[in-house]
Image (spheres, rainbow, N blue to C red):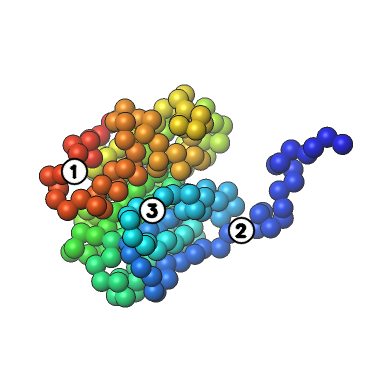
Amino acid sequence: MAEQPVATVVSEEFRQPLPQSPLPEQGKGPAVIFIGGFGDEISRIMPYVMLRLPALEDGPETRAYYHWHAGRPDNMEQGAAEICNHIATYRRNNPGAAVILIGHSMGASMALRTAHLLNYEDGGVYLITLDPADRGYTPSRPSAVKWWGNAYVVNSLSSHDYIAVMGGRWNSCRQADANLRFDGRNRDEAGLHYIHDNALSLLLSRGCKQGVSLFDLLRRQLITTESANIPAVAGSTNK
């Protein structure tokens, strides 16, 4: 008997919606929060990123995962407020801990909404938006964000990307510190085309004109104590 294609033998367990993994009250190191896009609880794009992303610092870190609505599909602002409450509790137990918000697609909109509700004078908030999309929300820089890196795809060859187009892609965000543009006609280091769903590549790949990844830039921000030591590319924009 011919072997069945993998797509036809996916277990029923895999088809079940993945629950959120909220930021715990207790933890160590920076809080790294991953926020998935529309339908991510089924496609599991950001949980995969959370699993595969290398450590941002040499020490421990605490990771969490939220859906694009953070459990409140009827009210995204309340969902953002819920994430903020979790962050506030975590930081009470870990004073001065950095907060890294990494959002993909509609999850980028939730990450931005959350960052706007944070009010930390120590500037310990960092934002990553991966091919953000939300037609109903206008991106603007939150005052609490110390650094904002954005990656987006153009000329995608994937038919799946029509969902991002319909949702309202942001593309380049003019108030971000770094905008990395990936051409879908090109391939990443693993030989895969740049597409909306390939969020891990948008975060780790150096296949842009700057020759650096968002992960590289963010890690430099976290380990650099003086802004003079940050490479000029961290403030560049490639529209």
Say which element carries label 3: loop
Among the two numbered marks 1 and 3 on one chain, the one whose residue lies closer to the N terminus: 3
Q: Quadrant of the N terminus?
A: top right
Residue that carries the numbered disc 3 in the rendered image:
55
* Numbered mark located on residue 109 in the image: none
Residue name at image x 49 percent, y 39 percent: 198
Residue 120 on image: x %, y %? 22, 64
Q: Which residue is mark 1?
A: 230
Q: Assign a secondary structure to mark 1.
A: loop
Q: Quadrant of residue 114?
A: bottom left
Q: Nearer the viewer, residue 171 or 222?
A: 222
Residue at (72%, 55%) from the top-left corner? 12
In the drawing, does residue 186 fall left or right of residue 237? Answer: right
Which amino acid does the dot numbered 1 rest on?
Ile
Looking at the image, residue 17 sits to the left or right of residue 74; the answer is: right
Q: Earlier in the sequence, mark 1 or mark 2?
A: 2
Would you identify the image quadrant in which residue 4 lies? top right
From what the image shows, is residue 123 above or below residue 187? below
Tell me the distance, in whole angstroms, between the alpha carbons under discs 1 and 3: 20 Å
Q: Above or below — where is 31 with respect to 42?
A: below
Q: According to the image, label 2 marks what residue?
A: 17
Give x and y (percent) for residue 50. Answer: 46, 53
